[in-house]
Image (tube, rainbow, N blue to C red):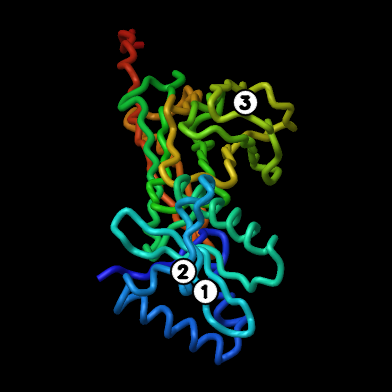
């Protein structure tokens, strides 16, 4: 038996939900429900005039129109999935010919969004963001070190307000440089930074995700005793499967007076929003500080 499914954009309520609940009266809703039941019980008898119209124009050849008989011309544009299921796309009340054309274009747009992950159908949103960080396992006090990062939206839906955030351990090191890396989806994004004296400010904007940029954090004009504590890459909306290609990097300079065995902990997190729900991933890297044995001077006995 085939299934009836509904297009579910990631950024708003499914169109059929609002249409069914807000724009139809009870009689019209019951007629639609009867048609839905008939499509499940006897799909062959329904998939033809006068219940269904198949659009033959090449641009719309994958689309159909479900027609509910009433004084009001209630219509639903739908398509058939590869599994033979019905996927409802755009409902509307037909008053003019242009209403049909607008619904057809809206339906094609929904199908495009399914390909980029910002729309699904009857699939629960599976949210997952992954982020990793690697660096030196051991380091001499006073030396600089580099961290390599990866980030990905492994959800099955697009995420809004997607970010990558690195927090520097300012108690034992100073932020020096960052490189942005590259990503598998072409979009524009910005970098912001935070200090111990000020909240986030823009470091660079209108960056292209397919380019790798380098920034010298030590060149930022700061007040006395002000240091950079955090850096964020803010991507906005990213599709399902968005991921780093060339790894972003961060370099820091450790304090020269760190004790032997001191643990430098550097943390990173990333996340994004689906409707009202946030999904985040976190990682950390620990580096052990090593001090070479200093020679012991001979005692004079005085």
Q: Residues within 10 Å of mark 1 (few under 14, many from 20)?
A: some
Residue 223 place in picture, x, y as percent? 74, 32
Judging by the rendered image, the residue that carries numbered circle 1 is 67
Of the two numbered discs 1 and 2 on the same chain, state the one appearing first in sequence: 2
Which residue is labeled 3 in the image? 217
Give left or right: position of 301 versus 106: left
In this image, 292 relative to 223: left or right?
Answer: left
Distance, label 2 to label 3, CA atoms, is 62 Å
Marks 1/3: CA distance? 62 Å
Residue 52 tag number? 2
Q: Is residue 46 above or below residue 172?
A: below
Residue in the picture at 43% in, 80% down? 35
Q: Is residue 263 above or below residue 83?
A: above
The image quarter containing residue 191 is top right
Query: In what element is the residue under mark 3?
Result: helix
Badge 2 density bin: few <14, some 14–19, many ≥20, Cα 10 Å? some
Question: Residue 234: which quarter of the image?
Answer: top right
For the question of whether residue 89 can be seen, the reply is yes
Disc 2 element: strand
Which quadrant of the view contains residue 196? top right
Q: Position of residue 126 (x, y in %)?
A: 37, 58
Of 224 and 62, the residue lying toward us: 62
Of mark 1 and mark 3, the one earlier in the sequence is 1
Measure the alpha-carbon separation of dots 1 and 2. Answer: 6 Å
Task: Name which of mark 2 and mark 3 comes first in the sequence.
Answer: 2
Asked if residue 151 lies left or right of residue 221, the reply is left
Q: Do tag 1 and tag 2 residues touch (Cβ < 8 Å)?
A: yes
Q: Which residue sits at x=57%, y=64%?
A: 12
Residue 201, above or below 212? below
């Amino acid at each position: 038996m085939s299934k009836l499914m509904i297009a579910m954009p990631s950024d708003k309520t499914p169109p059929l939900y609002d249409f069914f609940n807000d724009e139809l009266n009870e009689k019209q809703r019951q007629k639609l429900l009867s048609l839905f039941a008939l499509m499940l019980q006897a799909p062959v008898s329904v998939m033809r005039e006068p219940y269904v119209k198949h659009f033959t124009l090449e641009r719309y050849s994958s689309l159909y129109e479900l027609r509910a008989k009433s004084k009001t011309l209630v219509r639903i544009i739908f398509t058939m999935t590869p599994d033979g299921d019905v996927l409802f796309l755009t409902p509307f009340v037909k008053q003019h010919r242009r209403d049909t054309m607008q619904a057809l274009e809206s339906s094609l747009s929904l199908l495009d969004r399914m390909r980029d992950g910002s729309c699904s159908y009857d699939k629960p949103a599976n949210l997952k963001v992954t982020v990793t960080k690697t660096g030196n396992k051991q380091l001499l006090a006073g030396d600089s070190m580099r961290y390599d990062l990866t980030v990905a939206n492994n959800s099955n839906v697009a995420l809004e307000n997607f970010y990558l955030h690195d927090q520097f351990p300012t108690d034992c090191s100073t932020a020096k440089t960052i490189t942005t890396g590259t990503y598998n989806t072409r979009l524009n994004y910005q970098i912001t930074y935070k200090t111990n004296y000020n909240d986030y400010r823009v470091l660079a904007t209108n960056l292209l995700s397919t380019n790798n940029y380098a920034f010298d954090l030590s060149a930022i004009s700061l007040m006395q005793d002000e240091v950079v504590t955090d850096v964020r890459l803010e991507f906005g909306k990213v599709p399902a499967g968005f991921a780093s290609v060339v790894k972003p990097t961060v370099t820091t300079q450790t304090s020269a007076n760190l004790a032997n065995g001191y643990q430098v902990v550097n943390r990173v997190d990333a996340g994004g929003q689906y409707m009202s729900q946030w999904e985040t991933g976190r990682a950390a890297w620990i580096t052990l500080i090593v001090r070479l044995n200093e020679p012991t001077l001979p005692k004079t006995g005085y």
